[in-house]
Amino acid sequence: MHRSTRNLYLIWTAWTLVAVLSFCFHFYFVCKQIYGKAFVVASGTFVLWLVGIFASLYGFMRIKKEEERLSQTARLVCFGNVVSGIAHEINNPLAIAVGNTSLLEEKIQAVAPSEEFARLLSKIKAAHSRISETITSLVSATENSEKITEVDLQAAIKRTMNILKPHYLPIQIQVLPNEANPMIIGNRDLVEKSLVQLLMNAREAVEYREGPKIVIATEILENQVAMTVSDNGCGIKKEFLDKIFDPFFTSKEPGRGKGLGLFVVHSLLKLMNAQITITSQEGRGTEAKVLFRAAGKSAS
């Protein structure tokens, strides 16, 4: 049993004993009160009994929550170890295959240039690239978080947009201003990685729509800061919404998606104790809402 869980169990046991003993004393003094004695003591033990009951229930809920957190952490660590091993075993032969493909391409061009061979080699290199991207996405989702600090959310969004916006033309991307300049508790790199993946999903959703549009907005809530990425794309079918965070699940056509995007986002946000919810209507668009812990003046 983990140390933190064991401590919670000890506290819960102690308060449960307090509740039981208080009830026994209360019952004893109530019996005496019938004969006109110990009214104050009986009232005090009754209050203590109530406090013990509520403290015991609260402790029990804390224990269950801590067990769930530790279980989730253990699963992520186990998954990360497996993914790291798989990535190592795949990347080594993949590097050899990529290198030999490049050498083969050079020799063919030098000896007998052929458009047909060039086209086939291009497909092989594209397949290599896709394998590499898949492994990178998996490893990124299982890496330990870097130092958690205060992050300027608007600045993180601006940096991401400066990198991505030239590649998203002619898609209209609107970043709604927020003069409050919300600060969050997290990691800048993880925030930007998550936003990049959400924007990639949104771009694919609006790619074939007339008047494609993506909107990024931030809002300060009670002890939280919300960041939403919404689009007017194709939307997600209702029956798929409970599966979208599963690894390798995709509703896209074969060859267009690896099913890792939202799984990666969900995993990265968990490392910062952030939450994400997806609402979508098929044919009308999707909204991804991320809730970060507020920091500094953003926390009420």
Image (spheres, helix red, strand yellow):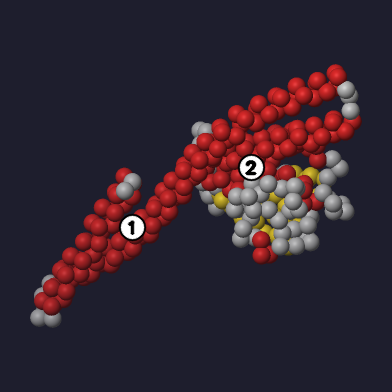
Q: Residue at x 81, y 20 (%)?
A: 107
| In the foreground, 106 or 299 | 106
Q: Residue at x 60, y 50 (%)?
A: 247
| Residue 19 shows in the view | yes
Closer to the eye: label 2 or 1: 2
6 lies left or right of 212? left
How far apart marks 2 and 1 lie (CA) works out to 34 Å
Mark closer to the chain start, 2 or 1: 1
Location of residue 294 in the rendering, given as x and y in whole percent from the top left corner: 55, 45
Rendered position, 238 above or below 184: below
> Which amino acid type is shown beneath numbered disc 1?
Gly
172 lies left or right of 75? right
| Residue 185 shows in the view | no
> Which amino acid type is shown beneath numbered disc 2?
Ser
The secondary element bearing badge 2 is classed as helix
Location of residue 211 in the rendering, given as x and y in whole percent from the top left corner: 87, 52
Location of residue 40 in the rendering, given as x and y in whole percent from the top left corner: 17, 69
> Which disc number belongs to residue 102?
none
In the picture of the structure, the residue carrying the numbered disc 2 is 194
Rendered position, 90 above or below 74: above
Q: Residue at x 15, y 69 (%)?
A: 25
Disc 1 packing (10 Å; few <14; some 14–19; many ≥20): many
| In the foreground, 275 or 300 | 275
| In the foreground, 137 or 179 | 137
Q: Residue at x 68, y 29 (%)?
A: 97
Task: Find the residue positioned furthest to the bottom.
Answer: 34
> Which disc number belongs to residue 59?
1
